[in-house]
Amino acid sequence: MNVDRIELPRPDDWHLHLRDGAALGELVAHSARQFGRAIVMPNLRPPITSVAMALAYRERILAAVPAGLAFEPLMTLYLTPKTTTADIDAAVACPYVHGVKLYPAGATTNADSGVRDLDGVDTVLSAMAAGGLPLLVHAESIDPQVDVFDREAVFVRETLSRVVERHPQLRLVVEHVSTAQAVDWVRDAPAHVGATITAHHLLYDRNAMFQGGIRPHLYCLPVLKRARHRQALVAAATSGNPKFFLGTDSAPHERSTKETGCGCAGTFTAHAALELYAEVFDRAGALDRLAGFASRFGPGFYGLPVATDRVTLERQAWTVPASYPLGALGEGELVPLRAGEEMAWRLVAADAIR
Ligand code: NCD
Ligand code: ZN
């Protein structure tokens, strides 16, 4: 399929970092321009661990939505060793909470309050399975002996398989899959196990991180892998299998915290997410499958309606700005993916201006 214009039901982002405070306005605006809803990650400082905190955060996000745009934040709780079944029951009862995020302790940005021992949260996982509340997993081993490029495959094989065996009814999303092993595992798992895939993992392999020098803005977790893994992700995303759906993992960090001696993990893609995904599907000759991946399979997994409004993308060149402002962190600025580079697709109409 070779077309220059494509129309989709308004997509949603099933894995997004919006941060908090003064940065919220700019970050919400980037996402609300493109997406109708987003699963909002709870890895703030302090983490969002209760329904009350999630509801307060939701209000702050809603207050930051630019006039004329409609954007619905879908809230999540951060699983810690202290999470109780009462916390889960409250989340199940709350229409605004859509999942609980599992960070293996220390695995990524603001993951230090996460879980080291999954057996310790077994009753909590049982309560989630019983209540139908999805577990959203950052699937990387925290064993320091495990090579950084193998952490996802090891976690999926050794830990996730056990979780699914013990909790066969638990709805589970393997977030930001980055390896062929994770793709295969999700594909062969029960129907209520899905995965999100980011634009950057679909577009780049690990060589891009070292292209002519070190490229800190391509450093994210899970780290980019070999070309064959990227190819497996593209095959999964464009396969039409509803288990695989869009989640940007757009993870903003102020420029100076990325371009430094020990830089933070996270790639910012919310400024052009749909255009980046369109490029992937176009190159794969699968633009006709973009609407499933971006607009239908996520709502299907989460039991929510597909959007009734639409967005339009056109094959049209434009140049990504060198940076965007980021209010929260003082003089902050944000270096987006493809900064200063040309894009092939452009979001031209979003009848969401409501
Ligand atoms: C995320 C962040 O910055 O919050 N970073 C990242 O590299 N993806 C955390 C995460 O999702 O791992
Ligand atoms: Zn993330």
Image (cartoon, helix red, strand yellow):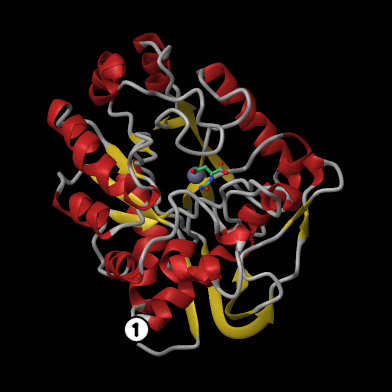
Between 289 and 219, which is closer to the camera in this rendering?
219
Q: Residue 303 appears at what percent x and percent y? A: 33, 42
342 relative position to 327: left or right = left
Q: Residue 221 appears at what percent x and percent y? A: 47, 48
Q: Residue 232 appears at what percent x and percent y? A: 28, 67
137 relative position to 13: left or right = left
292 relative position to 71: left or right = left
Q: Residue at x 42, y 21 (%)?
A: 91
Disc 1 residue crowd, few under 14, some 14–19, many 20+, Cα 10 Å: some
Q: Residue at x 25, y 56 (%)?
A: 183
Label 1, on which residue? 285
Asked whether the viewer can see residue 96, the reply is no
Amino acid type, label 1 = Gly
Between 116 and 276, which is closer to the camera in this rendering?
116
Report the label total: 1
Which corner quadrant of the image does residue 33 belong to? bottom right
Tell me the SS state at disc 1: loop
Asked whether the viewer can see residue 326, the reply is yes
* Quadrant location, the N terminus: bottom left
* Quadrant location, the C terminus: bottom right
Between 66 and 40, which is closer to the camera in this rendering?
40
Which corner quadrant of the image does residue 115 belong to? top left
